[in-house]
Amino acid sequence: MPSALRVVSSAFQREDLDPEHAAAVEQAVEDGIDLRTSSTQDSYGQTGTEITVVSYTAPDGSERFAVRDWSGAGTEILDSDDKSAVVEYYEGTVRERAKDSGPWDVTDVEGQVKGRIAYTVETSTDGTTWGTVKSDKTTVAKLNGVTTYLGAAKEVADQEIGPVEEANWNAACSEASGYRPGYLDGAEVITMLRVRIEVDGDDVAEHVHAFPPVTPTPEQARQWAEELEAILRDSLDDLYRDFDLDD
């Protein structure tokens, strides 16, 4: 990104200060106050890239502002006596890199989707009372490149729909056929699935999926019961054979 800021030190471009002066300014920036920051983290929570706005007192006693940009590729410090210019550069860099490399895990730039999210999956049999199925954490990068929290909620929900549809079919067939194996005791058809996305402790989006009514025909229910009973019987036969339970 083009910049009118002074280049204090850089692994990527020519510096504007002589080495001795640059070293003194670098130390002053290090001793300054962090005002704003954005960063990414690896799977272990270690910082991978970080860009920070710093307020500091220059060696000549004047108040200045700097952008300290750090990554595995190298470090760069740019500064100015104009805070607004530094902030503009910071926000522009954060937005530009999010487009190229994906979301930041920590950021204070308005409108940016954070890469790390938590989610809760809930189900309901009546559309009003909700029970939690699971809660977990993930990253936006693992959700097929979604760019909004609402998109993340829908993506997580899409992954949960298939198993619920299968469970609904089993519950409905069990009810219709009267065949109730132990693991289906009390099983009910799920009518709604809800995914809530949480960032920094706040709910930021949710997606609700409604399941259509499950109505197996008497023949489908009968066939389901026969097939399931055969599967369970075969499994029990295997158990007896493997452990010689007949002896």
Image (cartoon, rainbow, N blue to C red):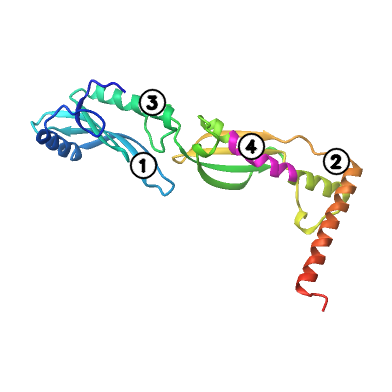
Quadrant location of the C terminus? Answer: bottom right
Task: Residue 216: give its label.
Answer: 2
Q: Which residues are magenta?
A: 154-166
> Is 156 part of what is drawn in magenta?
yes
Residue 125: tell me if it is visible: no
Q: Helix or strand or loop: what does disc 3 sit on? A: helix
Q: Is residue 118 left or right of residue 159?
A: left
Q: Decide: few, some or many residues near mark 2? Use Cα within 10 Å; few <14, some 14-19, many ≥20.
A: some
Question: Residue 230 or 136: which is nearer the viewer?
Answer: 230
Viewer-side label of 4, 2: 4
Q: Is residue 186 left or right of residue 120?
A: right
Q: CA distance from mark 1 to mark 3?
A: 17 Å
* Residue under label 1: 48
* Residue under label 4: 158
* Residue under label 3: 96
Q: Position of residue 231 (x, y in %)?
A: 82, 57
* Marks 3 & 4, CB-CB < 8 Å contact: no
Q: Helix or strand or loop: what does disc 4 sit on? A: helix
Question: Residue 99 or 59: which is nearer the viewer?
Answer: 99
Classified by dominant secondary structure, the portion drawn in magenta counts as: helix
> Is 242 part of what is drawn in magenta?
no
Viewer-side label of 3, 2: 3
Q: Position of residue 122 (x, y in %)?
A: 62, 43
Residue 158: tell me if it is visible: yes
Q: CA distance from mark 3 to mark 4?
A: 30 Å
Q: Quadrant of residue 106?
A: top left
Q: Is residue 239 above or below residue 159?
A: below
* Marks 1 & 3, CB-CB < 8 Å contact: no
